[in-house]
Image (spheres, grey):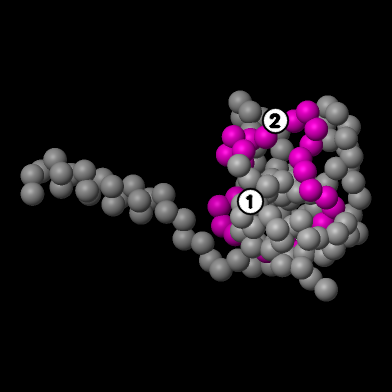
């Protein structure tokens, strides 16, 4: 094996080890601890489980979707018993924004406003030139709670 190929492979292994995330099993956390702005850096890389109250399908009007989530299905939730809040700029009353793969959207479409759900996923912080614009919850698994 020539030296440049060996060097490349060693660099590849080292960079993979340095940037790989060793996440523990998802644990259940309080909704506000995960999606509250005071906890911005936590729960971004590793999955977490939260309970939420389903609000509705859709994204905020006149807002641009993050490129990362262009092909996702959008829906809104609140903390259980929570209240709607006005969105910046438009003052549209909304909940927190959740995204899920379109293949899994049928689970969401069958929900009704006020249904309790347990979701597993990661937090995503949408930034623009270093300024935090919004927070999303990228859902990997969802189940309805009775």
Do the numbered discs 1 and 2 sit on residues whose CB atoms are within 8 Å? no
Residue drawn at x 51%, y 62% as measured from the top left: 23
The percent position of residue 116, horizontal first and vertical second, equals 82, 65
Q: Residues within 10 Å of mark 2 (few under 14, many from 20)?
A: few
Task: Calculate the distance from the C-alpha at mark 1 to the C-alpha at mark 2.
Answer: 18 Å
Which quadrant holds the C terminus?
A: bottom right
Query: Which mark identifies residue 102?
Result: 1
Mark 1 or mark 2, which has the lower sequence index? 2
Q: Is residue 105 visible?
A: yes
Q: Residue at x 61, y 52 (%)?
A: 101
Residue 11 in picture, x, y percent from top left? 26, 45
Asked which secondary structure carries label 2, the reply is loop
Q: Which residues are magenta?
A: 43-70
Q: Is residue 19 magenta?
A: no
Seen in the image, is 92 located left or right of residue 35?
right
- Residue 102 spot, x, y in % from top left: 63, 51
Residue 4: give x, y in percent of width and height.
Answer: 14, 40
Residue 122 in sight from this viewpoint: no
Instruction: State left or right for residue 100 relative to residue 118.
Output: left
What is the quadrant of residue 130 in the picture? top right
Q: Does residue 69 belong to the magenta stretch?
A: yes
Name the residue at the bottom extreme.
Answer: 146
Tell me which corner region of the image, top left, top right, bottom left or bottom right, holds residue 142. Answer: bottom right
Q: Residue at x 90, y 46 (%)?
A: 84
Residue that badge 2 annotates = 64
Marks 1 and 2: which is nearer the front?
1
Nearer to me, 125 or 111: 111
Residue 146 vs residue 49: left or right?
right
In the displayed structure, 132 sits above or below 24; it is above
Query: At numbered mark 1, what does the secondary structure look like: helix, strand or loop?
Result: helix
Residue drawn at x 15%, y 47% is 6
């Amino acid at each position: 094996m020539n030296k440049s190929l060996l060097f490349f492979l060693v660099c590849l292994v080292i960079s993979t080890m340095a940037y790989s995330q060793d996440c523990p099993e998802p644990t259940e956390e309080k909704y506000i601890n995960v999606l509250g702005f005071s906890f911005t850096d936590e729960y971004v890389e590793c999955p977490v489980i939260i309970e939420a109250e389903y609000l509705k399908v859709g994204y905020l009007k006149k807002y641009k979707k993050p490129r990362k989530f262009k092909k996702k299905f959008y829906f809104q939730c609140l903390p259980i018993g929570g209240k709607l809040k006005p969105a910046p700029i438009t003052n549209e009353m909304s909940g927190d924004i959740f995204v899920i793969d379109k293949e899994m959207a049928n689970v969401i479409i069958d929900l009704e406003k006020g249904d309790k759900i347990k979701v597993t996923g990661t937090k995503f912080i949408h930034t623009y030139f270093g300024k935090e614009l919004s927070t999303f919850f990228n859902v990997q698994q969802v189940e309805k709670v009775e």
